[in-house]
Amino acid sequence: MGFLRKRRAISTVLGACYFVVIVLMAFSLVMWEVSQYDAYQQLVNRMNQFDIDRMTENLVFRYPGVEVIASTPPYKYDIIVCNTGGIDINTTRIYIYDQNTGTMVILDKNSITDFYTNGFIKAGASGHEIHAESNYYIGEMTGHVYWIKIVTERGRIFSTPYPLPRTIEGPGGAGHFVDVGPIRILFEYRAINYTSRNQPDPKPGWSVPKGEFLFFYVILINVGTKEVCLKKESIITFMGYTKRGQGTMKTFFILDSSATYPDARQFNSGFVYDEVNKPYILKPNLSDPYSGGPSVIVKFGASDLPPDNNSVEFIAVDQYLCFIGLFYEYKGYNFGQTIPFVAIRTY
Amino acid sequence: MRPKGPLGHRKGISTIIANLLMVAIVLTLATSLFIWATSSFGIYQGSAGLWFSSRSEAMRERFVVEEAWFTDNGAKVNIYVRNVGDIDITIADIYVNRTRVEAGIAPSLPLILNTGQVVQITVTLSSMWGPGRVSEIVVATSRGSTVRGYWTAPA
């Protein structure tokens, strides 16, 4: 009972002990919160850095966008891009949408049928080729418009229409296109191409063979602000001339976009142009109309209006002046134009 | 002669009782305070921990809608969602034009998406999409993250 005899402040000591314990608990709580907040802040910084990295990514498609390597199944093509973002980019998937047929092709790295390789793009890489292999053909000369989307590992999506807008200059370095109304017609080496039974792949058509059925391919671009829908009366016509001025005239009517080449007098009826259900539609570039929308390859080769499906051929060796007669619907109105185009020869 | 007290000494009983009372009061109050502080700190720590945990998990979520493909002549839209974040996510809801899609989703929701994984979600629309029309598509996760995109149906 010694403590009772000593006049010590037991209550004060007990209270102080409790106080110290509670203060220690509060301090430990504060320390715990600080550590939690610190960890959270580190996470925030890390994810912010992730977002910064993601925003730093920039992928630019370089002309011509796609180079076809193999035009027989399995189709092989390279997608050409430049990494201008200052950070390495790892692609994870490529979507290709065929606007004409509504078909979607998905290329994955690990897929068996539709896949791609060389999808890691170093910072600053220019003209990097992503090697794609697919059972679906993608080519400029199909006349289709495709949308190619490349998805990166960080979640960015880069897309482009294909074919890309043309930048190749024509002879003389200037005046490489003609704008008439909402339509731009390119004038360059590949402005006019042809196919035939002996030439199934499109070839520049400045000089074409006589005695062979031909399809002509012409590149059109919409520089207006609304869609241009081509009508079935659209033609490309060739006025032959000789020294005596007695040349013949040959007219090629518009064909379906799926037309490839004529292998007989009557081509496949699937090539007959259907202006109602499957017309050529030239898309505008709404953000910058003058630079033009995606280029569209329009094909000609029928001897008359649909449903005619006879092919056309040049009979004689001659020189021909070429005119394009376009009928189209724009902003709800029908228009018609005759445009002097190129001059070709037959051999 | 003064009688001895209960402790055998002639000391002040009231002082001792007062001391004992004071000790008891201090003990009681301090114990109450200790219990209150402990529970309060515990509740605070628990809620703060939950906040940090949920915020951290939500912060680590990153996902994108890679593509929305309108198909089946206007009846369906295929949405491709990829998880590019640090943590698995659970896709809880999909909204098309500010309307929650409650039925006709394959695979059904909620859907767990692992890190780096991509999934195709087919949404059967209650009203057909019109050619060339723009649709707003929102994908929401169970942690509250959303990704919003605008997609144009083919013309």
Image (cartoon, rainbow, N blue to C red):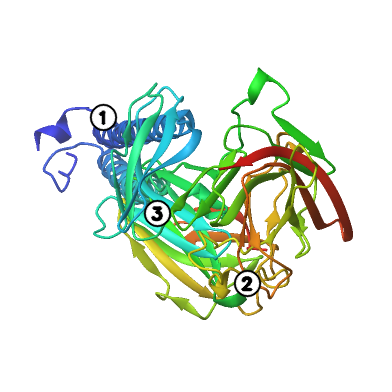
Q: Label 2 is found on which chain of the structure?
A: A
Residue B57 location (% of width, % of height): 37, 48
| Residue holding disc 3 | B82
C-alpha separation, residue under disc 3 versus residue under disc 2: 47 Å
Q: Amino acid at mark 1?
A: Ala
Whether residue B146 appears in this view of the structure is no
Q: Which mark is residue A9?
A: 1
A245 vs B102: above or below = above
Q: What crowding class fits label 1: few (fewer than 14 Cα within 10 Å), some (14-19), or many (20 or more)?
A: few
Q: Which mark is residue B26?
A: none
Q: What crowding class fits label 3: few (fewer than 14 Cα within 10 Å), some (14-19), or many (20 or more)?
A: many
Sooner in the amino-acid sequence: mark 2 or mark 1 = 1
Q: Amino acid at mark 3?
A: Arg
Q: Quadrant of the C terminus of chain B?
A: bottom right
Image check: B68 left or right of B87? right
Between A186 and A15, the one lying in front of the other is A186
Residue name at image x 13 percent, y 44 percent? B7
Q: Nearer the viewer, mark 3 or mark 2?
A: 2
Residue B25 location (% of width, % of height): 33, 46
Between B107 and A168, the one lying in front of the other is A168
Between A62 and A43, the one lying in front of the other is A62
| Residue holding disc 2 | A309
Residue name at image x 67 percent, y 18 percent? A172
Between A289 and A195, the one lying in front of the other is A195
Q: Quadrant of the N terminus of chain B?
A: top left
C-alpha separation, residue under disc 1 versus residue under disc 3: 69 Å
- Whether residues under marks 3 and 2 lie with C-beta atoms below 8 angstroms apart, the answer is no
Q: What crowding class fits label 2: few (fewer than 14 Cα within 10 Å), some (14-19), or many (20 or more)?
A: many
Image check: A340 left or right of A145? right
Q: Are marks 1 and 3 on the same chain?
A: no
A156 vs A24: above or below = below
Image check: A6 left or right of B54? left
